[in-house]
Amino acid sequence: MKNMSNVDVFAICHELKELLRGARVDKAFQPTKDTVIIRFHVSGTGRVDVVFQAGRRIHTTQYPLPNPKIPPNFPMLLRKYIKGGTVEDIKQYNFDRIIEFHIAKEQKFTLVVELFAKGNIILLNEEGNIILPLKRKLWSDRKISSKEEYKYPPKKGINPLELEKEELKELFKNSDSDVIRTLARSGLGGIYAEEIILRASVQKELPAADISGEIFDSIYNAIYELFEPLRTSKFNPQIISDGKEDVLPIDLKLYENYKKELFETYNNAADEFFSSKVREDIKNEYEGIWGAEVKKFEKRLKIQEDTLNKFHKTIEESQKKGELLYANYAKVQNILDIIKNAREKYSWNEIASKLKQARKQGLEDADIIESLDKLGNLTLKIENKIILIDAKKEIPENAEVYYEKAKKAKRKINGVNIAIERTKKEIEKAKNKKEIEMERVTLPQKRVKKELKWYEKLRWFLSSDGFMVIGGRDANTNEMVVKKYMENNDIYLHSDIHGAPSVVIKSEGKDIPETTIDEAASFAASFSSAWTKGFGSQDVYWVHPDQVSKTPQSGEFVAKGAFIIRGSRNYIRAATLLIAVGMVDYDGKRLMAGPLDAVKKYTDNYIIIKPGYTKKEALARGILRKVDEERIFTLEDMIRILPSGKADIVDERSIRRR
């Protein structure tokens, strides 16, 4: 996979500055060892995820990567220091592969992203000292470690946007290489060096130190012309394919005959290019994991089959050797008799020497003798079979050794066959498991921003009687619920606790039944701070719209999202904190979170939750798997509709009805 060049970084930095200046920093995640994702909230746009892969890339992404269950230290530290901070500026340092994010909170921080070599991501304090790096590094002139002063790497390249002729002349003069290598090593990279040479119509093998006159002017003008789109911010983001794969922010003549896919922004182009590679990497990684499981059993099967073959060979060879001893009984017996008689006068070594001489002289029966050792082990060669016998024993005893060896191998064959069948089943099981697990592997899917209906921007549910109930998500939407959507015949509800949404039942000109009011009360209680406090029930009151006012009494102050209630209140005591979550078909398929009776009315597939101990993200993931079998919605969609704070899943049979 390609790494971003200085030119790529320039284009990305320019776009990120336009997009994220003034944005609020949200959470940080670290899905892989070298990759950090930071979520920003951009006014008027909403969520924007930026992926930082040390040494490789930085861009916005619509392909969320799965996060580890236990977050590493680095993203947790980023959350501690810069979450809630505001992006003041984004800069490319010295036209290098270094980007700085300047973030203001109680104090100012700088997040430095290094894309050269193996890269790094480093958080600095106001004084420019390192709070924590993603990777600790040590060079002779730079030390990247906590509490150390951050030092930029020495300048090695040129800035083509500010390049003067004298600087280019100096670069060529001090070079001991050809022109294309000199340009490539100046920080422009191989592709842009090739492009400059093409535009200048210069031979790439020319020694850089010899370049002057018209050739020098052609190269300088080609550099100026090539990078003019960077000066004017007239990018043409594109992915090159059809025999060559690359992603670029500007047009190159090198690729004018290649297939191109154009994009609105370079961030979008980079996201499509790099994310497709990441998906391949993730798939290959899981293929490798489950493939190794299959290979483990296949290797075991090979060993078992080799063992089985050895046993069959042992049986065949041993039986054959026993039979050969009997087939050549007279000849072998004659040799044994000679050895037996010789033992009365000679040592084993002396007998071996005499047998060797007898064979050389071609004496009768000596042709089958190979050797005799000092222990009396006689080696014979009969019909090209090497047969080892004990010269101190008779032929039947020696033959029985081979027959017994064959019997022993036969006895072992049955066990090996059983083991082979078991291993074959294990292989089949592992292959099936691999297939199942590969289907379960969630590759990054493009997060397409959905166009929300007006009520989906708020808290909402449909009551079992068919009434729309809406509630605020924060101070701004509380204001919206009352000022924009509440009408004369509606009902306003509020949980009797600080930190609760304004809830409105939309009457649409009809009488609102008590069942809907009870459901709305449970809804108002469940989405209040009572949930995060772990309460099981909470008092809720309801009033008519004309009792809800934003006008304070003299000397009073009404905060944003809060309202003054005048007149008597109708209380619903101990409204239950209980929410059901399911996928309903209401103007299209939607996730709905509301009181149990309401959700049950519109779907049979739902999960019930109450205040508990499971973290919101883990809970959302579990619910999504059960209620969204079609995988229409994302984890973010599910998280969005759940109450704030932790919760647990409830068995419906354990619920006591009021």
Image (cartoon, grey):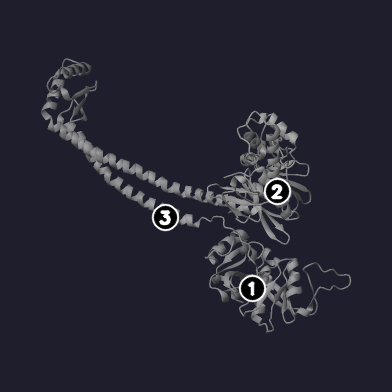
Q: Residue 568's x, y, as percent?
A: 78, 80
Task: State the SS at label 2.
Answer: helix
Q: Which amino acid does the dot numbered 3 rest on?
A: Asn
Identify which residue, 460 or 228, lies in the foreground: 228
Asked if residue 554 can be seen in this view, the reply is yes
Image check: 608 left or right of 406? right
Which mark is first along the chain, 1 or 2?
2
Q: Quadrant of the N terminus?
A: top right
Which mark is first along the chain, 2 or 3?
2
Q: Given this view, does label 2 or label 1 mark the residue nearer the observer? A: 2
- Tell me the CA gap for discs 2 and 1: 51 Å
Q: Residue 648's x, y, as percent?
A: 59, 63
Image check: 590 left or right of 504? left
- Tell me the CA gap for discs 1 and 3: 42 Å
Q: Which residue is mark 2?
A: 229
Task: State the SS at label 1.
Answer: strand
Q: Given this view, does label 3 or label 2 mark the residue nearer the observer? A: 2
Q: Which amino acid does the dot numbered 1 rest on?
A: Phe
| Neighbours of disc 1 within 10 Å: few (<14), some (14-19), many (20+) | many
Q: Which amino acid does the dot numbered 2 rest on?
A: Pro
In the displayed structure, 423 sits above or below 362; it is below
Identity of the residue furthest to the right in this view: 554
Q: Quadrant of the C terminus?
A: bottom right
Identify which residue, 597 or 259, lies in the foreground: 259
Q: Which residue is mark 3?
A: 432
Q: Which residue is mark 1?
A: 461
Q: Residue 333's x, y, as percent?
A: 12, 26
The reply to whether callout 2 and callout 1 are in contact (CB within 8 Å) is: no
Identity of the residue furthest to the left in this view: 330
- Tell me the CA gap for discs 3 and 2: 54 Å
